[in-house]
Structure formats: C-alpha cells, structure tokens
Image (tube, rainbow, N blue to C red):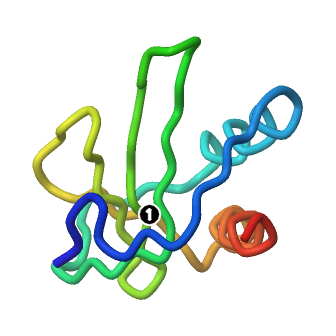
C-alpha cells in the first residue's frame, strides 16, 4: 500500500502554459466505476489555485486506478490508463522526470 511521502524521488512544479496542458489532459481522462485493490503509483499530482490545494492524487497504471488524497474520497477511482488520453498522461509524467 502506498502512503503519502513513500519513495518520493523527485518533484516538479509546472506553471503557466505547461500547467494548463497537464490540467487539460487530466480533464480528458476516461473514468470507470470500479478500481482494483492494488495501488503502486509511479506518479502523484497536485493541483493548486494560487496557494490553495485543490486536488492531490496518485495514479497507478498497473491496475488503472487513482487514489485521491485531497479531497479524501475514500475508495479509489478507476480510469482507463491504456486509452490514448491515459497513455498521453503517462508519457507526460515520464517526460517530466
């Protein structure tokens, strides 16, 4: 089980056009009603508006789920990590690091 702060190897802050591109890609993800139990996320993302944290989530492409840390939603949310949009989001994360 992944917990906040486990194994964080690097962080990157995006602003302006680059941040808008990530937010736009985030909004195009396909979500599913169920998610697998495992969660081994290679990446996490935080969205801010000014200094206010809006969302903090970790993403696992092995089991295609997202765990929302902020806001705390309880269960994991499934997403289609193998879709064109899911692959684009993964590529974006890999390119950033």
Q: Find residue 90 and report its horizontal and vertical position in percent.
A: 66, 71
Vertical side of 28 occupied by 84: above or below:
below
- Residue 96 is left or right of residue 5, and the answer is right
Asked whether 86 or 16 is in front, the reply is 16
Vertical side of 20 occupied by 50: above or below:
above
Outermost bottom residue: 62
* Residue located at (42% from left, 24% from top): 54
Residue, disc 1: 79
For residue 95, what is the image quadrant? bottom right
Q: Find residue 62 and report its horizontal and vertical position in percent.
A: 42, 87
Look at the image and tell me in which quarter the C terminus lies.
bottom right
* Residue located at (23% from left, 78% from top): 36
Q: Residues within 10 Å of mark 1 (few under 14, many from 20)?
A: many
Q: Find residue 41 and report its horizontal and vertical position in percent.
A: 40, 75
Asked whether 7 or 76 is in front, the reply is 7
Outermost right residue: 17
Q: How many marks?
A: 1
- Residue 55 is left or right of residue 34, and the answer is right
- Residue 7 is left or right of residue 3, and the answer is right
For residue 11, what is the image quadrant? bottom right
Vertical side of 75 occupied by 51: above or below:
above
For residue 84, what is the image quadrant? bottom right
Vertical side of 74 occupied by 94: above or below:
below
* Residue located at (53% from left, 56% from top): 30
Q: Find residue 61 and report its horizontal and vertical position in percent.
A: 48, 79
Look at the image and tell me in which quarter the N terminus lies.
bottom left
Secondary structure beneath disc 1?
strand
């Amino acid at each position: 089980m992944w917990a906040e702060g486990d194994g964080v190897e690097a962080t990157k802050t995006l602003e302006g056009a680059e941040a808008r591109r990530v937010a736009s890609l985030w909004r195009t993800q396909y979500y599913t009603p169920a998610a697998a139990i495992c969660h081994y996320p290679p990446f996490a993302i935080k969205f801010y508006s000014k200094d206010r944290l809006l969302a903090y989530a970790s993403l696992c492409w092995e089991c295609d789920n997202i765990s929302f840390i902020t806001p705390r939603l309880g269960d994991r949310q499934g997403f289609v990590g193998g879709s064109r949009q899911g692959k684009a989001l993964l590529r974006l994360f890999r390119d950033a690091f």
